[in-house]
Image: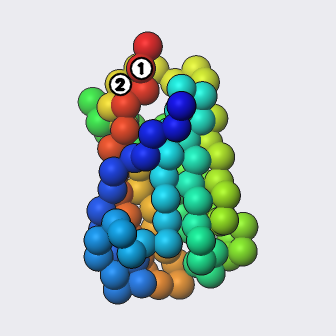
C-alpha cells in the first residue's frame, strides 16, 4: 500500500503541499515521485538521517520527471531525508520517510 510522504519547501514560489505539482509516495518496495508539471530539471538526493550519508542522488531532465521510481530493496532500516532541487525554478522540497526492516 502506498503512503504519501510529508514534505515542505518552496516550489515555483509556492508554499503549502496542496499547491505543489509534486507528490511523493512510498511503499515497502519503492519511492515514487510524481510531477504534474514536469518543466524543471530535478535533482533527487536521499540521505540517511543517522549518518548524514548520501545513499541516492540522480538528476532527471526536464520532461522526464512526471514519474520517477526509486527502488528501496536492500536499503537499511531507518529514517531518511529526501530532497528535490528544481534547476529552472530554484525550487527546493524536502521530507522524511522510514524504511522498515
> Position of 38 compared to 98: left or right?
right
In the rendered structure, which disc, 1 or 2, sits on the residue that comes first in sequence? Answer: 2
- Give percent across and percent down for residue 10: 33, 75
Q: Please state which of the two labelled residues, at mark 1 or mark 2, is closer to the viewer.
A: 1
Residue at (34% x, 66% y) in the render: 17
Badge 1, how many Cα within 10 Å: few under 14, some, many 20+? few
Residue 74 image point, x, y percent: 58, 20
Residue 12 in the image: above or below residue 100:
below
Q: Position of residue 60 (x, y in %)?
A: 65, 64
- Seen in the image, is 62 located left or right of residue 101? right
Q: Name the residue located 54 percent from the left edge and 26 percent from the top edge.
A: 28
Circle 2 Cα neighbour tier, 10 Å, few/some/many (<14 / 14–19 / ≥20): few
Relative vertical location of residue 76 with respect to residue 54 in this rendering, above or below: above
Name the residue: 29% across, 71% down: 16
Name above or below for residue 46 compared with residue 99.
below
Q: Name the mark on residue 67.
A: none
The disc placed on residue 78 is: 2
- Can you give x and y, in whole percent of width and height, for residue 98 in the image? 37, 31
Return the residue at label 1: 100
Secondary element at tag 2: strand
Of residue 18 and residue 39, the one placed in the foreground of this image is 18
Q: Quadrant location of the C terminus?
A: top left
Q: Residue at x 27, y 30 (%)?
A: 50
Q: Is there any visible trace of residue 15 in the rendered image?
A: yes
Residue farthest top in this picture:
101
Amino acid at each position: 500500500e502506498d503512503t504519501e510522504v510529508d514534505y515542505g519547501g518552496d516550489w515555483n514560489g509556492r508554499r503549502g503541499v496542496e499547491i505543489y505539482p509534486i507528490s511523493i509516495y512510498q511503499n515497502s518496495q519503492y519511492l515514487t515521485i510524481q510531477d504534474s508539471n514536469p518543466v524543471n530539471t530535478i535533482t533527487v538526493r536521499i540521505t540517511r538521517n543517522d549518518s548524514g550519508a548520501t545513499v541516492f542522488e540522480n538528476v532527471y531532465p526536464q520532461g522526464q520527471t512526471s514519474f520517477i521510481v526509486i527502488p528501496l530493496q536492500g536499503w537499511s532500516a531507518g529514517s531518511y531525508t529526501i530532497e528535490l532541487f528544481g534547476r529552472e525554478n530554484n525550487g527546493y522540497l524536502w521530507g522524511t520517510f522510514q524504511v522498515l526492516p
